[in-house]
Amino acid sequence: MTRQPREPGFRGWLRRVMPFAAIAAAILCLARLTFVSDAFVASHPIGALIQALTEVSILLSVLYYGPKAIRWLWRKTLWRVRRRLAITYLFVGLTPIVLMGALGLLAGFVVSAESMARGVRQEMRSAEEAASTAAHGLVVELQGLLPGATTGTIEKWVAEKGASIRSSLPGARLALWLGDPGRGESSAASAPIVSAPGDESSRPIGPDASPEREPLPSWLDGTESFHALIFVPPPEGSDGLFGSGSIRALRRGGAAGRRFDLLVTLPVSRSLVTRLHDATRMEIHPYFLKKLFEANEPGLHVATTGPSRSKSRNMVQLNVDGAEIGARSALKRDQLGAPLPETPYFVVVSATDWETGKPADRIGFIFSWSWSAAAGQILGNTAGGQFWKLALIAVGVTFLGLEILALLAALLITREVTGTVHELQLATEAVRRGDFSYRAKKNSHDQLGELADAFNDMSAHVEILLDERVERERMQREIEIAADVQSRLFPTSAPSLASAEITGECRAARGVAGDYYDYIMVGPGLVALALADVSGKGISASLLMSNLQASLRAQAGILGDGSAPFPAGAAGGPAASGAVARLASSLNKQLCRSTDINRYATLFLGLYDEATRVLRYTNAGHNAAVLVQPDGSLARLSLGGTIVGAFDGARYEESLAGLAAGAVLVIFSDGISEAMNVREEEFGEQRIADFAIANRRLPAEEIRQRLFDEVDRWSVGVERNDDQTLVILKAKDGAS
């Protein structure tokens, strides 16, 4: 077995190495899953090495064999035209629809979610305005109360007003800082007068339990009026992830020589969340993260310093501002401890840091988003909303119906196209196997259907042509056999004469010839010469030719055995007794009786007497033979009669021609004289005569060969369309 040569280069190296890498990957992967435990990998260097080798070998195998597998799958999947068209229709037809649908869904999600988030922010702004309005009214009332009021009266007023505003703002609290009398300013160091905190539902969510009992931050110094959403981060050093949110409204004033600071605080509590839920009809979750959107750094920014794996696989430790927390457990719940919804959406609010006074966008709430909730928020339950909801449903159903119709039309077109293509492929395979009787089914009345019809017609024509080819091959074999048989009918050797050379040849145009030539020794020194041209060509002409040959030889045999005696001449040999004419008449009668009236032959029949050098002949409608004497004189031997085999009562004349030593007799068929060149000009009898005169001194065999060569040069490039036959007799010196 011969070895295949190695492919050079890097690609060849990969093809030799990657099978071993894939086998190694399979073995290592099996060993890793079966024998090597996680504890061994984590604790032992050999285990880590096995793990690394497994991952590297698998990665290399996937990178090398993955594209090959994809290409193989691509070729197998898209080999059929139906699959290609289906994928094309999916990409061309469905891709824009999918993109438009995805864009519409995304736009609907964003618009609806932002609209719902805007509703939450609007409710928070309404609460903020309410707190600011309440603070302003309380300041006005407090300015009228301060003159002459005692501390007990003021504390009672704070308690009453705190309870009053809690009726409209659940969970709201008051804090009042009073300045020393006569100083005209508030005292930051004095303890504030605070209203009652309310029930448990109004308790602030987050670390900001009671901010009113602390001094006001310094950044509020000089500010007479302030209201905003406040964020209070968890205490410094705390591991808490969430801060506190609250709405605060600060008003400063003075009366009776005393300055005061009044702070209304509405903390984010269960009560406020319930109020937001009642107002928006949404599931609201407080979610004031510690690390939020920075004012100069848009986008959610969670500081992580190298996420690390803990001993428990279910906990990922994140370092947020230096504090490690269990992110999976903490971030999946809101500040009330309730789990977050499956489809959450963040409400970004602008909140002021109570410690620094810097406002920043941060996540404040999370709500549960759904299409039904979005439709309820956007469209509502009004008559207009119901109308647009029905309109959207109608448009969606119409669009879906049109899409289904388009898909059905594409499916129908694909089926018709690919069905015809599949049938043509099956028909092609059948033709490749040699089954030309297979016909492709016509699945559609379109161009492909016409193509199937054309293919079926082509197959039918090819089948007919193959049958004809088989028939032609059979006929060709029969013609070859007939040609072989016919070649045996022609004389195989020329008679041996002392005074003459005789040669002849027939070149068939179609395998078998309709021409016939012969020379027969009918007696001592007597040679019968014959050249016939049978009407038609091919097998039928050859059959008539064989009939003529049999009749001629039978009649010549009778002529030679004395049953038709030649009268004695002056020299003791046979005299011109009309034997050649009688032989022609006998042949004519024989052919007339054995063939149809439309089958005939032209015949030149001669009898050469070596003793006298005289040729007795009759020309039965054949081309005139050319007799050239040694001195170059020319005679055309044309006397005789009509064709043989056509007329039963035809009579023939006999003529004599003497041949001196060196004379040349050329007997030919019309296939030579009528040979055409590329200009459709005939060779002509005159060229034959001129050729005989010019070459009269050559031997008979050479004259024959040269004459055929001349005819071939004349008709080069033109197919031979008739049999070409020559008989040449060359008189020479000899005993007389």
Image (spheres, rainbow, N blue to C red):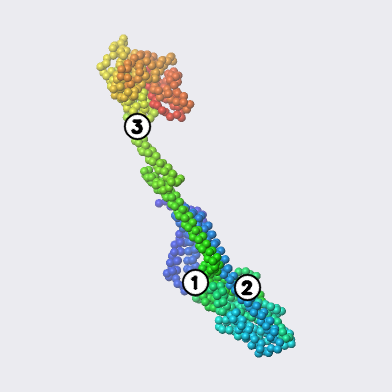
Number of numbered markers: 3
Task: Measure the C-alpha gap from mark 2 to mark 3.
Answer: 108 Å
Question: As drawn, is 556 to the left or to the right of 198?
Answer: left
Image location (x, y in percent) of residue 144: 69, 84
Q: Nearer the viewer, residue 126 or 414?
A: 126
Picture layout, residue 464 above or below residue 373: above
Q: Residue placed at 44% from the left, 44% from the top? A: 450
Which of marks 1 and 3 precedes in the sequence?
Answer: 1
Q: Quadrant of the C terminus?
A: top left
Q: Is residue 621 visible?
A: yes
Q: Residue placed at 66% from the left, 85% from the top? A: 192
Q: Is residue 549 visible?
A: no
**SS class, disc 1:** helix
Question: As drawn, is 240 to the left or to the right of 544?
Answer: right
Question: Which amino acid, by three-letter code, is at mark 1?
Answer: Pro
Which mark lies nearer to you, 2 or 1?
2
Task: Measure the C-alpha gap from mark 2 to mark 1.
Answer: 53 Å
Residue that mark 2 sits on: 350
Picture layout, residue 304 above or below residue 459: below
Question: Which amino acid, by three-letter code, is at mark 3?
Answer: Ile
Image location (x, y in percent) of residue 258: 72, 85
Q: Residue furthest top?
A: 570
**SS class, disc 2:** strand
Q: Nearer the viewer, residue 489 or 686?
A: 686
Residue that mark 3 sits on: 479
Which of marks 1 and 2 precedes in the sequence?
Answer: 1
Question: Which amino acid, by three-letter code, is at mark 2?
Answer: Ser
Q: Nearer the viewer, residue 110 or 652?
A: 110
Image location (x, y in percent) of residue 397: 49, 60
Residue 524 picture quarter: top left
